[in-house]
Image (cartoon, rainbow, N blue to C red):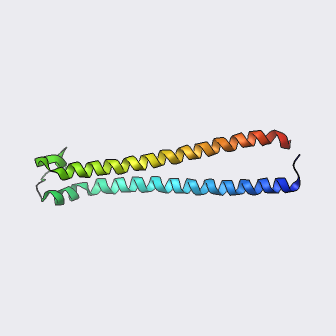
Amino acid sequence: MRSREERVRAVCCRVAQMRRQRRLRAITAGAVAASVLVTAVLAVQMPERMRAVAGNEVEDVQAAASVFRNGGAAGYVLIGLLAFVLGICVTMLCFRIRELEKARTDEEKREDDHGGADR
């Protein structure tokens, strides 16, 4: 059986852990929101940016692959850069989700280990 000090210490540790988890969830939610926002803004601005890069050579921005018209390398570079940034965002999101799941699993395991000793 735990003494009063041990229980107070355990409660303080649990409160600190819950605060860390809440902060990590907020950071993860912010990263997801920022990724979606950046992707949406770039998708909306892409036709205008390509029109400026191509020097008004792109008449129909709705056409598929109009970015690559006339063999311009700018379209390839831009799409490659956007794909790379999106890959980084998805990787960070997956890493955060894995950390949250690992922390939750560790917490449940710890509760199971200590749950029987208190009762």
Q: Nearer the viewer, residue 31 or 85?
A: 85
Q: Residue at x 18, y 49 (%)?
A: 67
Residue 1 is situated, as x and y percent measured from the top left of the image, at: 89, 45
Residue 22 is situated, as x and y percent measured from the top left of the image, at: 61, 55
Q: Residue at x 17, y 60 (%)?
A: 52
Q: Residue at x 47, y 55 (%)?
A: 31
Residue 33 is situated, as x and y percent measured from the top left of the image, at: 45, 55
Which image quarter holds the C terminus?
A: top right
Does residue 81 appear to the left or right of 23 in the view shown? left
Does residue 85 appear to the left or right of 31 in the view shown? left
Q: Nearer the viewer, residue 117 or 38?
A: 117
Residue 99 is situated, as x and y percent measured from the top left of the image, at: 56, 46
Does residue 15 appear to the left or right of 7 in the view shown? left
Q: Residue at x 79, y 41 (%)?
A: 115
Residue 47 quadrant: bottom left
For the image, the number of numbered tags is 0
